[in-house]
Image (spheres, rainbow, N blue to C red):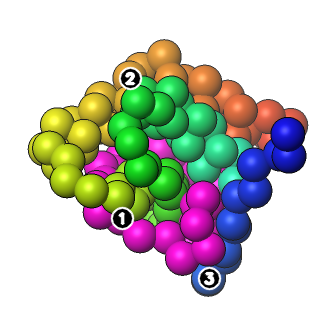
Amino acid sequence: MSKARWHITCVDDTLTLSRLALARFDVSASTVLPDGSRLAVAHQVRQDMWRALQGLRGFAPAVEVRREGGALHVRAGGQVAGAVAKAHVEGTIQGVLDCPKRRARWVRHATRGRAVA
C-alpha cells in the first residue's frame, strides 16, 4: 500500500495542507494558536480532524494555517462529496479545535526545538 500524499502550498504567510491538489472548504471551523511551525500544526490538526470524521463518506480534509500578528490562525475542514449536515460536521471540527488537550499537544509539537518566551 502506498503512503498517502498530501499537497502543501505556501502563499505569503499562509500554508495549506490538503488531500486534493486544490483545497476546498465546504465545511470549516477556525481557531487561533500561539506562533510555531505552520506545517507541524497543520499535520497535527489534520490528523485529529480525520480521526473525528473518518466515518464521513467522501471527506477530503484540508487545513489552512496563516501567521498573523504573532499567532497562527487555523482554518480546518475540507471538501465533502454529497449531502451532509453541515452544522453537525462543523460543530465536530470546532470541538476538535477547542479541545484543551489537543491544543496543548499541537503547541508542544509546533514549538519543539524552539525557544519559547
Separation of disc 3 and disc 2 at Cα? 28 Å
Within the image, what quadrant is residue 108 found in? Answer: top right
The reply to whether the C-beta atoms of the residues labelled 2 and 1 are less than 8 Å apart is no
**Which of the marked residues, 3 or 2, is nearer the chain's N terminus?**
3
Residue 4 x/y as whole percent: 75, 49
Label 3, secondary structure: give it. Answer: strand
Separation of disc 2 and disc 1 at Cα? 21 Å
Q: Amino acid at mark 3?
A: Val
Residue 95 x/y as whole percent: 30, 29
Residue 74 x/y as whole percent: 45, 54
Q: Which residue is mark 1?
A: 25
Residue 75 seen anywhere in this rendered image of the structure? no
Label 1, secondary structure: give it. Answer: loop
The residue at 69%/66% (across/down) is 7
Label annotation for residue 99: 2
Q: Amino acid at mark 2?
A: Cys
83 to 21, vertically: above or below: above
Q: Amino acid at mark 1?
A: Phe
Quadrant location of the C terminus?
top right
Q: Give the magenta part as a residue range.
A: 14-38
The residue at 17%/37% (across/down) is 88
Q: Nearer the viewer, mark 1 or mark 3?
A: 1
Q: Which residue is mark 3?
A: 11
**Which of the marked residues, 2 or 1, is nearer the chain's N terminus?**
1
81 to 12, vertically: above or below: above
